[in-house]
Amino acid sequence: MSKTQYKKTNPRIISLIEDLKSRSRENNAPIWREIAKRMQSPKRGYATVNVSRINRHTADGETIVVHGKVLGAGELNHPVVVGAFDFSDGARSKITDAGGECLTIEELVERAPTGSNVRIIR
């Protein structure tokens, strides 16, 4: 019996993975290779991060990336730049109300192509 190889069907995820891999090679940025590897995993393995976790594990003005969805449970006391695959409406409003920014992973790669000073939150 052979193993079934499942492929991604969402065109945004496919193009994001390809873009992250090429940006990683072009800019010698291993963080984008790691995010691409995590995005290739099944969707049930994507990170779901609450705003309270972001508040606990970040400092003022820090830039983070989430390879999944940011949810709105909790409070945020300081501004941070968050790049994620998706945001809930509550999370988006709490991050912007705290003075932070919500970016897609694609926008974050454009802003920080080398990935310096970007941390992965899981």
Image (spheres, rainbow, N blue to C red):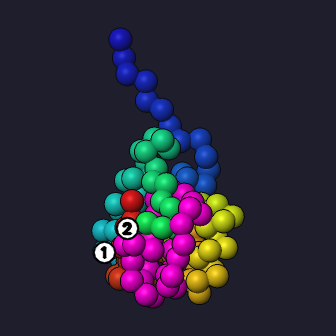
Residue pointed to by mark 1: 28
In the picture as drawn, the residue positioned furthest to the top comes out as 1
**At numbered mark 1, what does the secondary structure look like: helix, strand or loop?**
loop
Q: Quadrant of residue 113?
A: bottom left
**At numbered mark 2, what does the secondary structure look like: helix, strand or loop?**
strand
Residue 77 lies in magenta, yes or no?
Answer: yes
Between disc 2 and disc 1, the foreground one is 2
- Name the residue type under label 1: Asn
**What residue sits 45% from the left and 88% below the top?**
61
- Residue 78, position in %: x, y? 49, 85
Q: Quadrant of residue 87?
A: bottom right
Residue 79 lies in magenta, yes or no?
Answer: yes
Relative height, residue 24 to residue 6 (above, below): below
Quarter occupied by the C terminus: bottom left
- Residue 19, position in %: x, y? 49, 63
Residue pointed to by mark 2: 120
Relative height, residue 43 to residue 48 (above, below): above
In the image, the segment drawn in magenta is 54-82
How many numbered marks are there?
Answer: 2
CA distance separating discs 2 and 1: 17 Å
Quarter occupied by the N terminus: top left
Q: Is residue 121 visible?
A: yes
Q: Nearer the viewer, residue 73 or 47?
A: 73
- Residue 82, position in %: x, y? 51, 74
- Name the residue type under label 2: Ile
**What residue sits 37% from the left and 67% below the top?**
120
- Residue 21, position in %: x, y? 40, 62
Q: Can residue 107 be seen in this view?
A: no
Q: In which quarter of the image is residue 42?
A: top left
